[in-house]
């Protein structure tokens, strides 16, 4: 069964839509430049209802030790998602500092971009292949861009991995058919406007994955 992550949740009703649909991972984006940013203390209150029902993921971009400590003390996530230019050595520090697992997002545009996965596969619990954002983008993720899914054909990784980038209820079946991804991650594809999650689209996305 394909595992599902719904990311960038900021309200109780949309978090409930993800939990009622039995999403496997729910994500809080802790990155002030994002329209989905939520402060760790606020995320801790909101995501408490998810504990034990879905894995809680804190999405970060090049987090410093202070932020990691704050996230670990308040939100207590199951996973820290690293969506910046972190190194494998930094990931080991993140793991030690927080006690959480590590999801590492790798930006993909061409086949060569998978080279980094060889080393990262030994340092992350899960890799996430997300589209490289357009030039000049303020965000490294959550921009609704997809990459050529056929680049993933016949690739093998040590751990179950996420496909991300531009997925939505209408295209996720095709993405799964082409890539055979064991896990999928979505953010802007289940929104009505940037940062505004839509409970109906969350349910439709989960339904489309389950039907695939
Ligand atoms: O969602 C964000 O705002 C965000 C900000 C900074 C780093 C990562 C972010 N989101 C991640 O990107 C994927 C893909 O997004 P989309 O589905 O293409 O909109 C998202 O699921 C998050 O993991």
Image (spheres, helix red, strand yellow):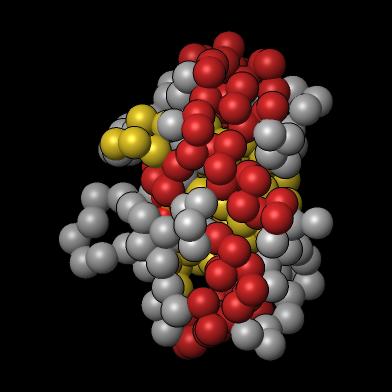
Give residue 159's position: percent from left, percent from top: 77, 66
Q: Residue furthest left?
A: 136
Give residue 40's position: percent from left, percent from top: 50, 22
- For image coordinates 59% across by 64% down, the residue present is 173
Q: In which quarter of the image is the N terminus?
A: bottom right
Q: In this view, does 79 lie to the left or right of 64?
A: right
- For image coordinates 69% across by 27% down, the residue present is 20
- For image coordinates 56% across by 43% down, the residue present is 204
Give residue 37's position: percent from left, percent from top: 38, 30
Give the answer, above or below, for where 211 lies relative to 108.
above
Nearer to the camera, 79 or 65: 79
- For image coordinates 42% across by 32% down, the residue present is 197
Q: Is residue 6 left or right of residue 160?
A: left
Q: Quadrant of residue 129?
A: bottom right
Q: In this view, does 156 lie to the left or right of 74?
A: right
Q: Can residue 157 be seen in this view?
A: yes
Give residue 195's position: percent from left, percent from top: 34, 34
Q: In which quarter of the image is the C terminus?
A: bottom right
């Amino acid at each position: 069964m394909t595992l599902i992550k719904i990311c960038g949740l900021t309200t109780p009703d949309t978090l409930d839509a993800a939990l009622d649909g039995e999403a496997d991972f729910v994500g809080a984006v802790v990155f002030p430049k994002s329209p989905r940013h939520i402060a760790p203390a606020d995320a801790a209150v909101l995501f408490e209802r998810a504990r034990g029902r879905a894995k809680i993921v804190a999405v970060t971009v090049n987090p410093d030790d202070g932020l990691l400590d704050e996230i670990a003390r308040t939100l207590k996530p199951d996973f820290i998602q690293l969506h910046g230019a972190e190194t494998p050595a930094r990931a080991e520090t993140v793991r030690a500092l927080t006690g959480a697992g590590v999801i590492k997002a790798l930006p993909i545009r061409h086949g060569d971009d998978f080279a980094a996965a060889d080393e990262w596969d030994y340092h992350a619990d899960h890799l996430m292949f997300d589209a490289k954002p357009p030039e000049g983008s303020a965000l490294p993720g959550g921009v609704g861009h997809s990459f050529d899914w056929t680049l993933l054909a016949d690739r093998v990784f040590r751990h179950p991995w996420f496909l991300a980038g531009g997925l939505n209820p209408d295209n996720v079946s095709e993405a799964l058919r082409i890539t055979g991804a064991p896990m999928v991650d979505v953010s802007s594809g289940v929104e009505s406007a940037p940062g505004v999650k839509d409970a109906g689209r969350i349910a439709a996305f989960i339904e489309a994955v389950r039907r695939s």
